[in-house]
Amino acid sequence: MIEAHDLSIRIGRRLVVEAATLACRAGEVTALTGPSGCGKTTLLQGLGLLLRPAGGRLAVDGEDATHWPERRRRAFWRERAAFIQQDYGVIDDASLAFNVALRTDLFGQPARGSLPGVREALRRVGLRRPESEPAAHLSGGEKQRLAAARALYRGADVVFADEPTASLDRGNRDRVTGLLEELAGAGAAVVIATHDERLARRCARVHEMARAG
């Protein structure tokens, strides 16, 4: 579980998130909603330990993580978290398989034992392309689904998704929404920043944000 108590975050000198208090629980999807510019992405990144708080407290499974050193934060990202970024977080020159597994053997192929899992993750997000194909060949919506496949493959404890349905048509939006619910059903804490009211209505918790200040 990720908990924030009076969490504030600054970007430069500007206060972007002010005194946010919320809990993101395992087995649930939590939505961060609000108007453009209210700090949804900034709060999402703060909850994911990508940005350091300017004030307040952040806890991971009851442990104070507000001032975790870089080593602890990197271990959290590597071992427990998955991120579905608004800019997709995709390596265009790398294969679909590498983008999902983020590891290869000496010959540039998916590491031994990982290929079946990669194929299953691609199938579940509806990407029916060769796993060796470069990610540069994908459309924006397909890259969004590739990022979702990575989260599925990793089986992360916590999934942070920034506008996960923004580039998708209705069919694929429903598919990705279902996958996020599936991840939560498997025990993950799923946190999303979204403008999509239909997606927010399906979430167990909604944290409505306003502009800081």
Image: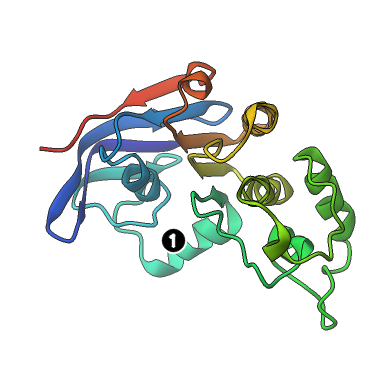
How far across and down, in percent of the image, does residue 127 sit?
79, 46
Amino acid on which disc 1 is placed: Arg
Q: Quadrant of the C terminus?
A: top left
Looking at the image, residue 32 sits to the left or right of residue 172; the answer is left
* Residue visible at 82% across and 68% down in the picture: 110
Q: Nearer the viewer, residue 191 or 193?
A: 193
Q: Is residue 45 above or below residue 174?
A: below
Q: Is residue 134 above or below residue 197?
A: below
* Residue visible at 30% across and 52% down in the picture: 66
How far across and down, in percent of the image, does residue 203 sit?
51, 21
Q: Is residue 68 above or below residue 55?
A: below
Residue with the mark numbered 1: 73
Question: Does dot 1 land on a helix, a strand or a loop?
Answer: helix
How far across and down, in percent of the image, does residue 32 sit?
39, 31
Looking at the image, residue 121 sits to the left or right of residue 157; the answer is right
How far across and down, in percent of the image, does residue 208 sit?
31, 24
Q: How many marks?
A: 1
Q: From this viewpoint, which residue is outermost toward the top?
A: 201
Q: Nearer the viewer, residue 81 or 165?
A: 165
- Residue 195, quarter of picture: top left
- Residue 126, quarter of picture: top right
Q: Nearer the viewer, residue 5 or 110?
A: 110
